[in-house]
Amino acid sequence: MTRSASTRAALLLAVLAALLVAQAATAAMEPGDFKEALARAKAEDKPLVIDFYTDW
């Protein structure tokens, strides 16, 4: 790999790492009441993600 290609690859990895960190910092799980969460999502014009599981 040439020096230019190595520099580009390192820059790409740095950008991807920064994007992953930024995404992780903005996604926060907040437990609570569904109606309250839905009202808040509508008020902030954001999607509502519902995360649930079962051990059937």
Image: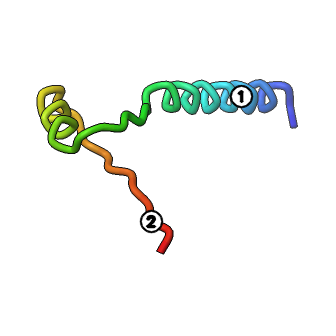
Place residue 1 in its image quadrant.
Answer: top right
Q: Residue furthest bottom?
A: 56
Point out residue 14 in the picture as x, y percentages from the top left corner: 68, 25
Label 1: state its secondary structure: helix
Please state if 39 lies on the left or on the right of 10 as rendered.
left
Q: Nearer the viewer, residue 48 or 20?
A: 48
Q: Work out whether 32 lies above or below 26.
A: below
Instruction: Please name which of the two marks, 1 or 2, marks the residue nearer to the observer.
Output: 2
Q: Nearer the viewer, residue 47 or 12?
A: 47
Place residue 47 in its image quadrant.
Answer: top left
Q: Nearer the viewer, residue 35 or 13?
A: 35
Please state if 36 lies on the left or on the right of 14 as rendered.
left
Three-letter amino acid code at the position of disc 1:
Arg
Q: Looking at the image, is mark 1 or mark 2 earlier in the sequence?
A: 1
Three-letter amino acid code at the position of disc 2:
Thr
Please state if 34 lies on the left or on the right of 27 as rendered.
left
Label 2: state its secondary structure: loop
Q: Work out whether 56 lies above or below 7.
A: below
Place residue 54 in its image quadrant.
Answer: bottom left
Point out residue 19 in the picture as x, y percentages from the top left corner: 54, 29
Label 2 neighbour load within 10 Å: few <14, some 14-19, many 20+: few
* Distance in Å between CA atoms under marks 1 and 2: 45 Å
Name the residue rendered at 12%, 28% in the picture. 43
Q: Nearer the viewer, residue 44 or 50?
A: 50
Q: Say the numbered circle drawn on residue 8.
A: 1
Name the residue rendered at 52%, 31% in the picture. 24
Please state if 43 lies on the left or on the right of 28 as rendered.
left
In this figure, which residue is indicated by the disc labeled 2? 54
Point out residue 16 in the picture as x, y percentages from the top left corner: 61, 32
